[in-house]
Image (cartoon, helix red, strand yellow):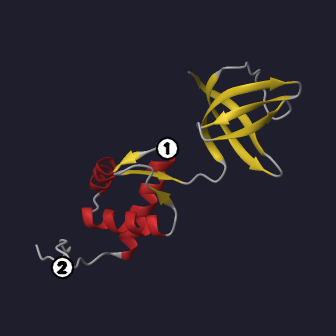
Amino acid sequence: MEKNKKGFEILPNVEIDVKGSHRVKKIIFEFLSKKDRASLNEIIELAEKEGFSINQVKYALISMLSDGTIFMPERNLFSIYKKGRGVFRIYVERVYRGGATVLVNDRFRARVEETDSCIVLKKGARLVVRGSLVRDRVMRLKIYDIVAYE
């Protein structure tokens, strides 16, 4: 393989079918929508089962990373940005009349209103819930249902 001035390997030019790469992007996006995170190997295996080449997968991943559709939380792991909706891990920090304060994904706090959820929250509970995040003046979590107790 050729190397550039700094010693990095240069990938040979590859003809890429634009329509094919669009289909690969769609398959990758649907796969990541069902799964929270996926490794590069899992994505390549899925695309090869569908009949796409590794180069088409790499091109699709690079273009999806550059346009902000997906991101890499860790090395060789891919995930999609969910615009407010999804599955969240919560820890109930404080319960008060009319709602509760929860820690969402161990990163930020949100308020759960009594009218927004159909469940009873107990202080110290760890849950995996399906819901949506809404930000007006404060971050609010609307819980649709409980996926699991931790």
| Label 1 crowd (10 A; few <14 / some 14-19 / many >=20) | few
Mark 1: secondary structure: helix
For the residue pair 15 and 116, the one nearer the viewer reads as 116
Quadrant containing the C terminus is top right
Residue 75 in view in this figure: yes
Q: Residue at x 88, y 28 (%)?
A: 98
Work out which residue is located at the far front of the displayed protein and give it: 6
Give the labeled residue for mark 2: 4
* Relative height, residue 15 to residue 28 (above, below): below
Residue 143 at x, y = what percent? 72, 34
Which numbered tag is attached to residue 112?
A: none
Q: Measured along the vertical axis of the image, is residue 135 above or below residue 103?
A: below
Tell me which residue sits at (43%, 62%) in the image. Answer: 25
Kindly identify the residue that appears in the image at 38 percent across and 69 percent down. 21
Q: Is residue 132 above or below residue 112?
A: below
Residue 124 location, x and y as percent? 67, 20
Name the residue at the left extreme.
1
Image coordinates of residue 95 in percent, x first then y, are 79, 24
Residue at which label 1 appears: 34
CA–CA distance in space, label 1 to label 2 = 39 Å
Q: Position of residue 71 (x, y in %)?
A: 47, 57
Q: Quadrant of the N terminus?
A: bottom left
Considering only order in the chain, which callout, 2 or 1, is on the residue closer to the N terminus? 2
Horizontally, residue 30 falls left or right of residue 59, namely: right
What's under tag 2, amino acid-wise? Asn
Label count reads 2
Amino acid at pointer 1: Lys
Q: Nearer the viewer, residue 19 or 37?
A: 37
